[in-house]
């Protein structure tokens, strides 16, 4: 069995085992997560050596069979999931802080099901299998949202479920219409679909469903509450990974559709611009730390959608690679930020932004992790966020697309404004800290958050590797 097949089957089998043996769930879950990371690394190495590969399950090829396609873009997303998932799993394995409950036993089956669904989605080569994996992913994500059992979490999970069902209905209608038009639903049929009116309507329905699942403005109504009220490990997974799946599929359709999907790209760019501005405005007004980070996700998703929209035809542009790198850098930084926010709330007993600078508590590892992650999200050197924005802006300047350049720069300034509200309080010193103030004790969550934040920083220095992997996508 190849790495491709194991990346799909192993997490689902481990999820079943964790559900059947709750006492061993943490051990099984951590082992499966680390094994998944190993297979992701092997897949990336194989692709760098030999290029893209396809696996037909059961020997049945498209359009009748299920084909898994592994290329540079899929491998980058799988690697992103493995890296972030390993850090979050490490945090979930740690001993809870005094007075805080341990992660609910359902975390591990839900996380492993989420992992398997994301791997299957990244490797799927047809629209119907993408729909199926979205359904599995959506149900697992709703479970993660409701994991704490609080009234706010349950209400947010219900909104998440409602939005997910609406997005799934649009997806299914689009897939059905695509099959009626082309007689097949593998991604190789996308160029034919853009040539006909019914085919374009089918793709528009699919993209509308993806916009709901990605919480793209103005369809983002469900997302801030879901991410803000979930447990910190669940928030990190939802914000850093789950919303990326819809953006990944949008990028994949853009790559397959070529020049014929230009109107859809224009819609993504406009919606992304609105998301950047609206998300930043609400982040500036947020009173709670996790709610600010959740609204920041709306804004950052908008930036990625804008990058997808302005990338143009992949055949004569490499700007789509900037969008892929922005997805990766956002995943690392946002996961670090949510884990750090959870630890800060544990240290202080609340997550009110106005009360972050307490005099009896010195800044700890979580505060430094949040600050480093903020640097990457703003896009300052030498982080991966800086490299992604640099490639994007450089390409836009070459096209003399000054309006888009101005929007990206405006989004950058706004992100610096709302994140500085937290960083200026997190890294408090001088008169804000009493001489005898204590430092927070180290926790596994600090290690995970700091590791992810430093990873976002280091990725900017090693950005040649993801770009080299992405070069295998169109081969």
Image (cartoon, rainbow, N blue to C red):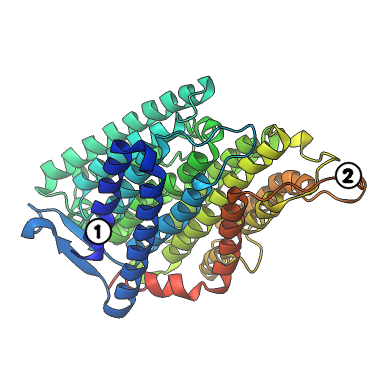
Residue 360, position as x, y percentages in the image:
84, 40
Q: Is residue 166 above or below residue 334?
A: above
Circle 2 residue: 432
Q: Which residue: 9% across, 54% down? A: 63
Is residue 457 something that shows in the picture?
yes
Question: At numbered mark 2, what does the secondary structure look like: helix, strand or loop?
Answer: helix
Q: Given the current orientation, which residue lies at the most extreme bottom position?
A: 49
Circle 1 residue: 6
Is residue 206 something that shows in the picture?
no
Residue 109, position as x, y percentages in the image:
35, 40
Residue 199, position as x, y percentages in the image:
20, 46
Question: At numbered mark 1, what does the secondary structure look like: helix, strand or loop?
Answer: helix
Q: Which residue: 38% across, 61% down? A: 37
Marks 2/1: CA distance? 52 Å
Label 1 crowding class (10 Å Cα cut-off): few <14, some 14-19, many 20+? some
Label 2 crowding class (10 Å Cα cut-off): few <14, some 14-19, many 20+? some
Q: Given the current orientation, which residue lies at the most extreme front position?
A: 23
Q: Which mark is residue 174?
A: none
- Examine the image and state in which quarter residue 53 appears: bottom left
Mark 2 and mark 1 lie on one chain; the one further toward the N terminus is 1
Is 452 left or right of 355, judged from the image as shown? Answer: left
Q: In which quadrant of the rendered image does the N terminus lie?
A: bottom left
Q: In which quadrant of the rendered image does the C terminus lie?
A: bottom left
Residue 303, position as x, y percentages in the image:
53, 51
Is 135 left or right of 333, judged from the image as shown? Answer: left
Numbered label tally: 2
Which of the two residues, 214 or 79, is positioned nearer the viewer here? 79
């Amino acid at each position: 069995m190849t790495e491709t097949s194991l990346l799909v089957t192993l997490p689902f089998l481990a999820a079943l085992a964790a559900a059947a043996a709750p006492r061993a769930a943490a051990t099984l879950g951590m082992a499966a997560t680390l094994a998944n990371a190993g297979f992701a690394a092997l897949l990336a190495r194989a692709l760098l050596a030999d290029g893209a590969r396809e696996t037909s399950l059961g020997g049945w090829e498209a359009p009748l069979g299920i084909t898994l396609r592994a290329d540079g873009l899929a491998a980058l997303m799988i690697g992103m999931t493995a890296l972030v998932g390993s850090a979050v799993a490490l945090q979930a394995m740690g001993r809870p802080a005094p007075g805080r409950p341990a992660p609910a036993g359902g975390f591990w089956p839900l996380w492993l099901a989420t992992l398997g669904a994301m791997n299957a989605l990244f490797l799927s080569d047809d629209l119907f299998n993408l729909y199926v994996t979205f359904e599995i992913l959506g149900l697992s994500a709703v479970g993660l949202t409701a994991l704490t059992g609080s009234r706010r979490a349950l209400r947010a999970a219900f909104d998440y479920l409602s939005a997910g069902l609406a997005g799934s209905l649009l997806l299914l209608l689009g897939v059905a219409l695509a099959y009626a038009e082309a007689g097949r639903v593998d991604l190789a049929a996308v160029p034919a679909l853009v040539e006909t009116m019914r085919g374009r309507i089918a793709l528009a329905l699919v993209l509308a469903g993806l916009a709901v699942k990605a919480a793209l403005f103005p369809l983002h109504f469900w997302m801030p509450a879901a991410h803000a009220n979930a447990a910190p490990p669940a928030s990190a997974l939802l914000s850093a990974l789950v919303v990326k799946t819809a953006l990944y599929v949008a990028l994949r359709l853009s790559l397959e559709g070529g020049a014929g999907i230009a109107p859809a790209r224009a819609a993504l760019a406009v919606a992304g611009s609105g998301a950047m501005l609206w998300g930043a405005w609400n982040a500036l007004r947020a009173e709670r730390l996790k709610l600010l980070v959740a609204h920041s996700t709306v804004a950052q998703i908008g930036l990625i959608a804008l990058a997808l929209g302005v990338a143009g035809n992949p055949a004569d542009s490499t700007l789509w690679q900037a969008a892929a790198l922005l997805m990766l850098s956002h995943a690392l930084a946002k996961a670090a930020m949510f884990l750090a926010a959870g630890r800060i709330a544990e240290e202080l007993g609340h997550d009110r932004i106005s009360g972050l600078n307490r005099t009896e508590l010195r800044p700890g590892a979580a505060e430094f992790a949040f600050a480093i992650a903020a640097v990457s999200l703003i896009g300052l050197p030498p982080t991966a966020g800086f490299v992604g924005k640099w490639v994007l802006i450089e390409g836009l300047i070459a096209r003399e697309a000054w309006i888009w350049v101005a929007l990206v720069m405006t989004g950058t300034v706004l992100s610096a404004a709302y994140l500085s509200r937290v960083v200026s309080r997190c890294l408090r010193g001088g008169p804000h800290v009493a001489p005898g103030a204590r430092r927070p004790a180290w926790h596994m969550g600090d290690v995970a958050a700091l590791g992810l934040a430093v990873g976002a920083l280091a990725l900017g220095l090693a950005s040649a590797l993801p770009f080299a992997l992405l070069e295998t996508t169109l081969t």
